[in-house]
Image: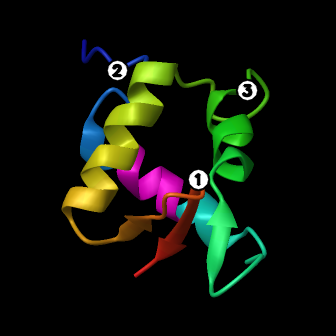
Amino acid sequence: MKLMNERPHSDPEAAGRKLIELAKGVEAVQDGRIHIEKNNAPFLSKNGCNSSGPEFGAGIKHAVDQGWLELHESARAGLT
């Protein structure tokens, strides 16, 4: 019997990829940037990805480290 990971976004890379997928569906507000909370809600909600705050943070960090996402001091993020 193979056990399945009940937390698919516990892996920072998987979380980062999911956040990028969600970000691509969000309309940019300025200079190609999006409000990060537009990703936060669907990633964390029970009806969405049902992921945790630490998974969100690890996913954001991984996406930034990989150059997939660039954070702006205004709390907006831009896809790279």
Residue 56 as seen in the image, left or right of residue 64: right
Residue at x-position 71% and y-position 70% = 25
Which amino acid, by three-letter code, is at mark 1? Ala
Magenta span of residues: 15-20
Residue at x-position 64% and y-position 87% = 31
Front label number (3 vs 2): 3
Quarter of the image where one finds residue 24: bottom right
Q: Residues within 10 Å of mark 3 (few under 14, many from 20)?
A: few
- Which quadrant would the C terminus be assigned to in this image? bottom left
Residue 4 at x, y = what percent? 34, 20
Badge 1 element? loop
Up/down of 38 relative to 43, above or below: below
Q: CA distance from mark 1 to mark 2?
A: 35 Å
Q: Which mark is residue 4?
A: 2
Q: Are marks 3 and 2 in contact (CB under 8 Å)?
A: no
Badge 2 element? loop
Q: Which mark is residue 75?
A: 1
Residue 21 appears anywhere in the view? yes
Residue 17 within the segment the image draws in magenta: yes
Q: Are marks 1 and 2 in contact (CB under 8 Å)?
A: no
Front label number (1 vs 2): 1
Which amino acid, by three-letter code, is at mark 3? Ser
